[in-house]
Image (spheres, rainbow, N blue to C red):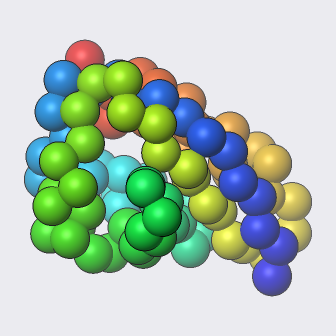
Amino acid sequence: MMEARFKVVVANKVVHFRPLARLRELATQLDIELLLAYRGDTLPISRILALIGWELAEGDEIEVIVRARGDTAPLLAAVVAFIQEGCGEK
């Protein structure tokens, strides 16, 4: 299994359940293991309620971690672009 990481700045005013659910759906569609890291804590996208507890907001920097079989670069790029575009909220 290959892994790729990238730091991205949150574009949403507030990150709540709906954008995280969309991000989880994208991870499922891409067939990847998706984790987010923030202030020393790393959680899988499946832990939406715990991720909400981070109270992420516009300007916060998170690390996106993608694990998958094969080339992770295009998968990571898709996830990063989705986050930068507001996870379907803009």
Where residue 44 sits, quadrant-wise, is: bottom left
Task: Give me the residue at 86% from left, 60% from top.
Answer: 71
Residue 78 lies, in percent from the top left, at: 61, 40
The answer to whether residue 65 is left or right of residue 21 is: right
> How many numbered discs sit on the rendered protein?
0
- Is residue 89 in view from this perspective? no
Direction front: furthest residue: 40
Tell me the quadrant of the picture where the N terminus can be found. bottom right
Direction right: furthest residue: 71
Taking depth in this image into account, of 17 and 29 the one nearest to the observer is 17
Task: Give me the residue at 25% from left, 17% from top.
Answer: 90
Residue 74 lies, in percent from the top left, at: 76, 45
Residue 72 lies, in percent from the top left, at: 79, 58
Q: Is residue 49 above or below residue 12?
A: below
The answer to whether residue 23 is left or right of residue 7 is: left
Residue 63 lies, in percent from the top left, at: 56, 50
Where residue 83 sits, quadrant-wise, is: top left
Taking depth in this image into account, of 32 and 6 the one nearest to the observer is 6
Q: In this view, does 13 lie above or below 60?
A: above
Task: Give me the residue at 56% from left, 52% from top.
Answer: 64
Task: Give me the residue at 17% from left, 57% from top.
Answer: 52
- Is residue 23 in view from this perspective? yes
